[in-house]
Amino acid sequence: MRETFDVPLAALTTLRLGGPAKRVVEATTEDELVAAVRDADERGEPVLLVGGGSNLVVADSGFDGTVVRVATRGVEADTSASCDSGALAACGGILVSAAAGESWDDLVAYAVDQEWSGIEALSGIPGLVGATPMQNVGAYGQEVAQTIWQVRTYDRQDRRIRTFANADCRFAYRDSRFKGSDRYVILSVSYQLREGDLGAPVAYPELARRLDVAVGERARLADVRPAVLALRAGKGMVLDADDHDTWSAGSFFTNPLLDDAQVAALPAAAPRFPAAGGRVKTSAAWLIQHAGFDRGYAGRFDDVSLSTKHTLALTNRGDGTTTELLELAREVRDGVRATFGVTLVPEPTLVGCAL
């Protein structure tokens, strides 16, 4: 377990923003991860868990506590998952368990290479495995709630290991029991995947068009992954050190879930998708653009802007600050609210700052 002090958090986030952390501990094993968190708890220090840093917006003042970098590794596959092992199980199922510190996209690539389907549309998403249950990571018609079998955690309150089955994770749109709470440290995640060279039924129209299939049809895994990567790259959503459009936290706002009155107030052209609980989901990117904030919009700022490829990403152009980024985010949020009566909600975790 390696310990360093006064570490700039900008170097640990994909936005490349954020002031220093008082102390950083890198945990390479599960025992080290639990021990690092437990030690900080016993000393009464605030704890911030950092994986890939792709979903963090850190204050310019930094973090006055212990940052625990999750660097655990390990992937195990059980090919004997039976048809009666639970609600997610299927004949020919593969149970894949990965340490929280494993690269998410490396796990997706591995699954596709092994011809295990269920997470292929989540290709190219930055960050680590342990972050995926937190906000029920999803894209292009898939979300991890569809395949997560169980989540193994360290419970900081009860000071013990706890494992949650899928049904106990309280998954919802970009949400779970783990989001917004620092009680549980995710140690590993198990996913139940299906064997075969075909991916899950394609649920997202844009991806279906790219693959030349109808929505609901299946395509070869070997075709789905590159198609998703190409779509994400076209929106600046695949990390590239030389492309400032990828110096972001991904989608900065979640797609709003609206009630009947809000839906009725939308323009006829606004996208509408059915959502759980009888609500309707609309596109945050569409609302932003039609409220007058086009791609590349920077307002009065020189060093932060909306991505030049996608209105949903706020980006650091090289010398930005978190303060500037949040001011731009407020301008966009307030403009959408004034135009459409819808308040956008930030998707990243805000550390030491607020919108």
Image (spheres, rainbow, N blue to C red):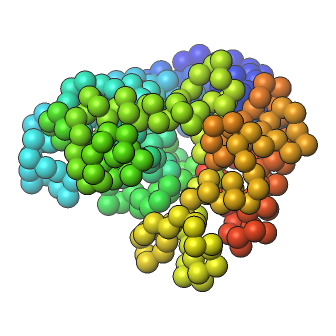
Vertical order, 124 against 345 (above or below): above
Figure quadrant of residue 52: top right
Which residue is nearer to you in this view: 352 or 117? 117
Which residue is nearer to you in this view: 314 or 63? 314
Vertical order, 129 against 73 (above or below): below
Which residue is nearer to you in this view: 184 or 264? 264
Is 308 left or right of 179, judged from the image as shown? Answer: right
Is 144 left or right of 62, judged from the image as shown? Answer: left
Question: How many discs mark residues in the rendered view?
Answer: 0
x and y percent of residue 317 in the render?
A: 77, 29
Vertical order, 165 against 313 (above or below): below
Residue that sits furthest to the bottom in the current view: 261
x and y percent of residue 251 in the render?
A: 60, 45
Q: Is residue 47 visible?
A: no
Figure quadrant of residue 61: top right
Is 169 left or right of 298, judged from the image as shown? Answer: left
